[in-house]
Image: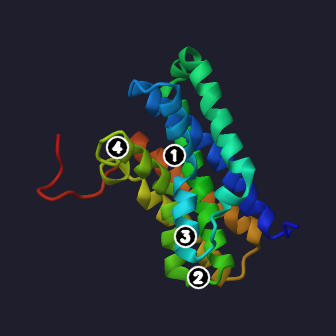
Amino acid sequence: MRSAADKPIFTADLAGTCVFAIEGALAAILGGLDLMGVMALAFATALGGGIIRDLLIGAAPPQAIRDWRYAAIAFVAGGVTFAFTAAVQRIPAPVLIGLDAAGLALFAVAGTEKALAYGIQPLIAVLMGMITGVGGGTVRDILLARIPAVLRVDIYATAALAGAAVIVLGRHLRWPVRETAIAGGAVCFLLRVVSVWQHWQLPTAGGPHP
């Protein structure tokens, strides 16, 4: 029986799973993979971060393996994306950026909340929120033999860290759980979207590159 406290985490996890499965499927399609490759990348992108998080905090076997709904959502989202590739590829770039930011925010919230629920210390809980948000995309990029986006794109992991930090701070200040989760997700989402819009980047060795 899932407790009331677990429901927001579960909902955010499933919503993020759907969004990132679509992203993974799109990356596979653009990479020229076949149907099996599309489904594999949809699964890895959607669930990789959560599986890594669960293994690190001792929630084994991972929730994505124990609960069939995670895999079902990932495969359905990947299959629909494959079946309607032409329509999905016509989605405007700003919409895709917004979906990506939403998925990142949902996973950052879910990852941080679950780590806290398992008694993980605040600093590590923030890192678990980040890992949940960026882990699946990192696995996707490795499978596509490219440098993970989290290491080269403008503010991404930083946005997840910021959102997770808001959640930990809210818990410390005893803010209401639901409002804290919304605030953390909003900070992550807005920071990611604004960073793309304004072309914000973290410093690199040797200064900015053209």
Residue 18 at what x, y percent from top left?
A: 65, 42
Q: How many marks?
A: 4
Mark 1 lies on residue:
45
The residue lying at 74 percent from left, 59 percent from top is: 10
Q: Earlier in the sequence, mark 3 or mark 4?
A: 3
Locate the C terminus by quadrant. top left
Mark 2 lies on residue:
120
* Mark 4 and mark 2 residues within 8 Å of each other at the beta carbon: no
The residue lying at 78 percent from left, 67 percent from top is: 6
3D distance between C-alphas at marks 1 and 4: 25 Å
* Mark 1 and mark 3 residues within 8 Å of each other at the beta carbon: no
Q: Earlier in the sequence, mark 1 or mark 4?
A: 1
7 is higher (above) or lower (below) than 80: below
Graded by Cα atoms within 10 Å as few (under 14), some (14 to 19) or many (20 or more), the crowding at tag 4 reads: few
Q: Quadrant of residue 157?
A: bottom left
The residue lying at 59 percent from left, 76 percent from top is: 58
117 is higher (above) or lower (below) than 85: below
**Along the line of sight, the residue nearer the viewer: 99 or 193:** 99
Specify the amino acid type for callout 4. Answer: His
- One can see residue 206 in this view: yes
Specify the amino acid type for callout 2. Answer: Ile
- Which one is in front in this view, the residue at disc 1 or the one at disc 2? 1
The reply, left or right, for residue 11 in relation to residue 4 is left
Mark 3 lies on residue:
55
Provide the secondary structure element on which disc 3 rests. Answer: helix
User: Which residue is most to the right?
Assistant: 1
* Mark 3 and mark 4 residues within 8 Å of each other at the beta carbon: no
Q: Which mark is residue 199?
A: 4
Q: Earlier in the sequence, mark 2 or mark 3?
A: 3
**Along the line of sight, the residue nearer the viewer: 206 or 70:** 70
- Which one is in front in this view, the residue at disc 1 or the one at disc 3? 3
